[in-house]
Image: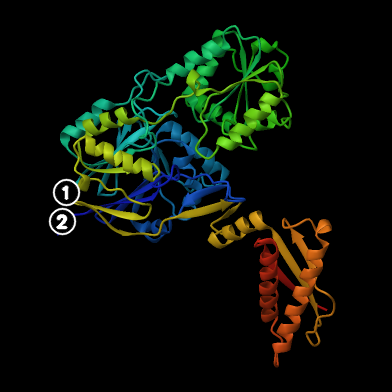
Amino acid sequence: MAEKLKIIPLGGLDEVGKNMTVFEHGGETIVVDCGMGFPGDDMYGIDSIIPDVSYLVKNKARIRGLFITHGHEDHIGAIPYVLKQVNIPIYCTRFTAGLIRLKLEEHGLTKSTKLTTVEPGETVKVGSKFQVEFIHVNHSIADSVALAIHTRMGTIVHTGDFKIDSTPIDGDVIDLARFGELGKAGVLALLADSTNVERPGYTPSESLVGKTFMRQFSGCSERIIVTTFASNVHRIQQVLDAAAACGRKVAVTGRSMENMMKVSTELGYMKVPKGVLTDLNKLKGLPANKQVIVTTGSQGEEMSALYRMAFSTHKQVEIGAGDKVIISASAIPGNEVTVGRVINELFRKGVNVVYDRADMLHVSGHACQEELKIIHALVKPRFFIPVHGEQRMLQIHCQLAQQMGMPRNHVAIAENGSVIELTAKTIKLGGTVPAGEVYVDGSGVGDVGAVVMRDRKRLAEDGMVVVVLPLSDYDGTLLSTPEIITRGFIYVKESEEIMIELQNVALEAVIAATGRRKRSRDDNEIKGAVKSAVSNYLYKMTRRNPMVIPVITKV
């Protein structure tokens, strides 16, 4: 029987985010990335979404290590939640380790977690079946890597998130030579980032954004406020450099931005020009044309510093005419409305808002079609698995691979939970494992499921009607007219007729239910009858389906 290697995505397919992939060979397992996803507008109250790792918990004795490609939330955000269920040693680069440590400290997991830093170019041997090589790539966060997973069956290349940047800010270009060497030696399968596969051509270099900052800063008499992704250390570096060149001081506001600055400067990934960084309170004493504020809020998040500035709730910064806000980020799909709301509010306050992508205020960290083709050409994989993308992206990436000469039956388009089985000569989908979404709501993880989310959606869309039924504890008879309480359904003071009619409908339902009762009193039967009668009446009268909750009080 042919030897098999299994690849099982637990997140990152049919979605952007929540990236996590399992590799199994010879009774041993490794995991690549452990990311979170972000809730949609219809996920009321949910803070984040993490992968279902029940398969890993069930097979934890076989897991040898968790390998992280880079420090973005969609690759490291689920780590503390997963570690509480299954303790896995983590291997990653120095900057990524710095960001993971912040999470471990927050969740009290520092002492119980083995965190090993690896330099690009090094190889880690875990167990007896896997050797994992770290390969430097360019992305919108420092210290990003691709992984070459060496097994007895062959080598699997996982690109992680990447782009090909010939003029990166840190001067460290992607290690294309190593991809080429691996291709010459023979690669069994390639897993590649599909996020930007819809875009033809090449992704522009990060260094172009620095030139834009210089244009925006030069000769500007206004106070400048720049917002970008906190994790984009190279972008923040370019803001600091432009400020220094134009004689401006810089202050930072926003918790995630402050944390990122601390980690990146301590580890040497950001070089702050001498005398440029200052405290926010000291900055306010300077002339407007000497000030730059770097802040969080590029995605319009309600708790972010820019949002609070826009809606006048920031304790230290008051914003208005005489301010220039530069939004150096594009809206993540789904965030367009919240970003637009903040931009509109800034305009209302007379702020000069610069947010047009055409002026190179933002460039992507993901490879476009020609860069993906270069990786395919260098790696020359026998099999291909597109990852990190929605269905259309995976399909387009499959077409791109076919344009490069790969047979369609050598490409596997999988779903989260699919088991992709590889032999030296074949690739096929062979069954599934549990996979899905686990909701994080406050301190609760996984206690909010599909039923609760359905209830929240219904409450948000149609509201709630509570029917209070005072029953005699002695003989179960109704002691007074049912009380009707509504929330989010109708305005009671303007709907007295419906409220009186609802009382009558509930009263008749109770009478009918108690009349059917023979010996014992059945509260659930009464509740069911009232719920059904009130729901039917409300739908007939209003064409709405509020949640109806009968409550029996015993007197």
**Amino acid at pointer 2:** Ala
Indicate left or right for 11 with 329 as reference. Answer: left
**Amino acid at pointer 1:** Ala
Q: Vertical placement of 40 versus 219: above or below?
A: below
Label pair 2/1, CB-CB below 8 angstroms: yes
Q: Is residue 107 visible?
A: yes
Indicate left or right for 130 with 303 as reference. Answer: left
In the image, farthest residue toward the front:
541
Q: Nearer the viewer, residue 555 or 129?
A: 555
Give the residue at x 55% y 28%: 262
Instruction: Pinpoint residue 511: horizontal percent, then vertical percent.
Output: 76, 83
The answer to which quarter of the image holds residue 390 is: top left
Give the residue at x 15% y 49%: 425
Q: Secondary structure at mark 2?
A: loop
Indicate left or right for 415 with 48 as reference. Answer: left
- State the mark number for residue 228: none
> How many numbered marks are there?
2
- State the mark number for residue 424: 1
In the image, farthest residue toward the top:
219
Q: Secondary structure at mark 1?
A: loop
Tell me which numbered mark, 2 or 1, is placed earlier along the sequence: 2
Instruction: Pinpoint residue 265: horizontal percent, then vertical percent.
Output: 51, 24
Image quadrant for the C terminus? bottom right
Instruction: Pinpoint residue 101: horizontal percent, then vertical percent.
Output: 50, 39
Instruction: Pinpoint residue 207: horizontal percent, then vertical percent.
Output: 43, 17
The residue singled out by tag 2 in the image is 2
